[in-house]
């Protein structure tokens, strides 16, 4: 029998390739590079090409010899600099995520409650900034926040302040930059869940005696939790590793982990240590995500 | 905050016919109630009185304004004009969360993130009822709707029928003065419908709560209701008991809405002492019918006769008090317990006849193309002037 004419077999082949494709993608572009970085993090830096020692020494007298070292991780633990950059990154990413949620929720809710033709227009406006280069938009904030910037000039003209305020190159400027850049990533998933929210549930809660604020707390927010989680992850993850915004808007000495990583790779040429920094950062990200997932699954039962 | 309904108002279900008793105070009163959406009038200046313990049904096709009326009772829509009184209190401007009224939604609107128990307890928590009382009242309700074993489940795990019971329990646990039900049986399959229908009636009987049901299904309305209000284009066409609206429809629309009816064009020959004699168009057969109200000689009217009121015979029946016409069996359908015949009369009109098969026979008593006599008692003729 011709195997091509067997529909069951062809279906199965089709199905496994559909399922297999995303797995192959993850394997090739996520897991494989990660394995390489993971491997490098156990090496020693050397002045060579590539600038790290191999994991296994094939030429040793006793045959093969494992050269793996935990020195890089030990160094990360011992040097306060790394701890501080991690903590600072987590703090900035967490506060930015919270601010995005505070700003994004009412916007997403308002858009979801608009009549249909308005919704698409407003969503378009939300993603409109993406049509300009990200770098350009961050530079624009330098123009706005600088000593001679628009905001300072306006405040002086209005007589509210006498001397220009130091706004650029502060943590505040980093928050402004991150929130401004990432708020659409909060709005879009929130909108997707809020738009599907059944209005009958709101009316049912009101019917049972809930005031509008109670309806919001008891129904709207709990029902939006998948969107809140998705939005928070979409903001928190890139914000944690953000390099450009703190580099352009932040103070020179404000070390976020993205900056530390960059310095280790390109300035110090210490690939193994940089790899260790990257691996630890990944674990900082993956652990809370997995906890979230677990929580989500449990709440479904 | 709503006053917890005292036992005094929880009297037994409506017995007798309070709407005929001028001394009984209506429990729900709608006075000149209207609702406009832009230029569209959904509800047009309606008046209605519903009595305590009634199972009142508002019946109409889609877009007739019945849902808008229900939503105004619940407090989700503000009336454009008119007042709503419940138990003597004007609630027209009261927000939904303060009204002594609860609703069972067509979509059930059960909170998916709360367990069955939490769903039922929600309204009591908002009311500020003590924890111990919440527990006992929720457990009482779980018994009533037979969901005790599923108390800790999330609604997602329940069937449609079970979710509906949650919705019902959640509304009833607040001991509302009025329970509003929006198409309560529409989403259920046939078997479950019948079962739920009887359960609803039992629960209503047990608690004595006034139920207001909105439906588009005349059968549902007939079997559930103490009284039915037939609604069309924002107004009530007729309000009456199920048998009143079925047997004494006030016009063609109502007659046609409830089951099948044969309509004959006729001309009034004589009308006096509440008895009308009219000549059927086409055949010239004379019909007698009971009708109060003025009719002029020569006036065009319609005579309606329900299919089950017609007798079908091969032989000429006695004519005393009966109207008789002749025809040929054009089509027949055998349903086991009954048969339906479509008979073409002399005037070319097709008349539907429904008979109970009270004789046991393997052969059909009447066949296609049989010549038959159709007759009906003159008291069964319905005079329709509109």
Image: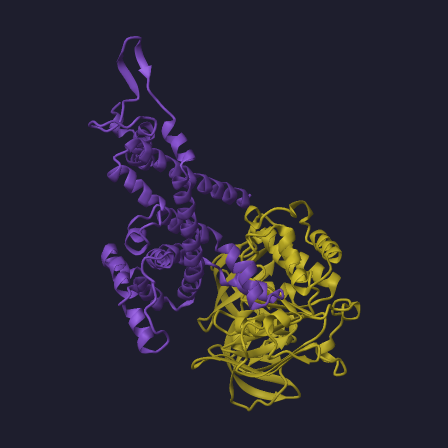
Chain colours: A purple, B yellow
Q: Position of residue B288 (x, y in %)?
A: 60, 80
Q: Nearer the viewer, residue A14 or B310?
A: A14
In which quadrant is the N terminus of chain B drawn?
bottom right
Tell me which residue sits at (30%, 22%) in the image: A55
Q: Which x, y percent locates residue B192?
A: 60, 52
Instruction: Say which of A78 and A221 sits in front.
Output: A78
Q: Residue at x 70, y 79 (%)?
A: B26
Report which quarter residue A139 is drawn in: bottom left
Q: Quadrant of residue A54?
A: top left
Residue B219 sits in which quadrant?
bottom right
Left or right: residue A279 compared with residue B297: left
Q: How many marks?
A: 0
Side (left or right) of A79 relative to B107: left
Camera-side residue of A83 and B14: A83
**Residue B219 visible in image:** no
Q: Position of residue B143 (x, y in %)?
A: 72, 51
Residue most extreme to the right: B8
Relative to the observer, which residue lies in front, A36 or B72?
Answer: A36
Q: Is residue B315 above or below residue A237?
A: below
Report the residue that reaches farthest toward the left. A49
């Amino acid at each position: 029998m011709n195997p091509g004419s067997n529909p069951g077999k062809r279906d199965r082949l089709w199905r496994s390739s559909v399922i297999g494709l995303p797995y192959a993608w993850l394997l090739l572009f996520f897991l494989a590079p990660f394995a390489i970085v993971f491997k490098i993090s156990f090496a020693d830096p050397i002045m060579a090409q590539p600038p790290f020692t191999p994991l296994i020494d094939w030429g040793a007298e006793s045959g093969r010899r494992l050269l793996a070292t935990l020195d890089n991780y030990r160094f990360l633990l011992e040097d306060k600099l790394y701890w501080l950059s991690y903590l600072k990154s987590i703090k900035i990413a967490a506060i930015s995520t919270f601010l995005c949620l505070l700003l994004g929720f009412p916007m997403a809710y308002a858009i979801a409650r608009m009549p249909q033709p308005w919704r698409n227009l407003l969503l378009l406006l939300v993603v409109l900034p993406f049509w300009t280069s990200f770098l350009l938009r961050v530079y624009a904030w330098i123009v706005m926040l600088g000593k001679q910037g628009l905001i300072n000039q306006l405040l002086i003209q209005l007589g509210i302040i006498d001397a220009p305020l130091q706004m650029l190159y502060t943590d505040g400027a980093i928050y402004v930059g991150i929130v401004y850049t990432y708020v659409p990533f909060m709005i879009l998933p929130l909108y997707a869940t809020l738009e599907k929210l059944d209005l009958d549930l709101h009316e049912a809660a009101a019917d049972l005696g809930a005031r509008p604020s109670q309806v919001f707390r008891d129904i709207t927010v709990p029902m939006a939790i998948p969107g809140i989680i998705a939005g928070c992850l979409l903001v928190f993850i890139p914000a944690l590793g953000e390099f450009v915004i703190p580099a352009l808007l932040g103070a020179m000495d404000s070390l976020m982990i993205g900056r530390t990583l960059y310095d280790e790779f390109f300035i110090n040429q210490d690939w193994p240590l940089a790899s260790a920094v990257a691996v630890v950062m990944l674990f900082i990200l993956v652990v809370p995500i997995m906890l979230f997932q677990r929580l989500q699954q449990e709440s479904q039962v | 905050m709503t006053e917890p309904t005292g036992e005094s108002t929880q009297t037994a279900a409506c017995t007798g016919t309070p709407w005929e008793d001028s001394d009984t105070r209506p429990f729900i009163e709608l006075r000149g109630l209207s609702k406009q959406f832009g230029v569209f009038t959904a509800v047009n200046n309606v008046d209605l009185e519903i009595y305590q313990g009634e199972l009142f049904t508002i019946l109409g096709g889609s877009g007739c304004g019945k849902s808008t009326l229900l939503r105004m009772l619940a407090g989700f829509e503000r009336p454009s004009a008119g007042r709503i009184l419940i138990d003597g209190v004007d609630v027209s401007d009261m927000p939904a969360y303060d009204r002594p009224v609860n609703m069972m939604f067509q979509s059930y609107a059960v909170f998916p993130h709360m367990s069955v128990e939490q769903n039922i307890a929600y309204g009591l928590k908002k009311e500020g009822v003590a924890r111990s009382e919440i527990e006992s009242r929720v457990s009482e309700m779980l018994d009533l709707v037979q969901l005790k074993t599923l108390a800790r489940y999330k609604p997602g795990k329940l069937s449609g029928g079970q979710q509906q019971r949650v919705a019902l329990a959640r509304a009833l646990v607040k001991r509302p003065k009025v329970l509003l039900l929006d198409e309560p049986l529409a989403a259920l399959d046939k078997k479950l419908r019948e079962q739920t229908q009887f359960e609803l009636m039992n629960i209503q009987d047990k608690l004595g709560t006034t139920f207001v049901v909105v439906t588009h299904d005349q059968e549902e309305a007939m079997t559930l209701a103490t009284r039915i209000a037939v609604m069309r284009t924002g107004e009530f066409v007729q309000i009456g008991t199920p048998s009143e609206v079925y047997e004494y429809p006030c016009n063609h629309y109502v007659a046609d809405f409830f089951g099948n009816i044969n309509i004959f064009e006729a001309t009034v020959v004589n009308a006096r002492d509440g008895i009308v004699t009219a000549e059927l168009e086409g055949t010239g057969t004379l019909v007698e019918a009971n009708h109060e109200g003025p009719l002029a000689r020569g006036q065009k009217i319609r005579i309606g006769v329900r299919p089950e009121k017609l007798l079908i015979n091969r032989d000429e029946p006695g004519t005393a008090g009966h109207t008789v016409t002749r025809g040929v069996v054009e089509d027949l359908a055998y349903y086991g317990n009954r048969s339906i015949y479509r008979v073409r009369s002399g005037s070319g009109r097709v008349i539907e006849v429904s008979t109970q098969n009270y004789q046991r026979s393997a052969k059909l008593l009447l066949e296609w193309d049989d010549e038959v006599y159709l007759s009906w008692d003159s008291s069964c003729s319905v005079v329709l002037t509109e």
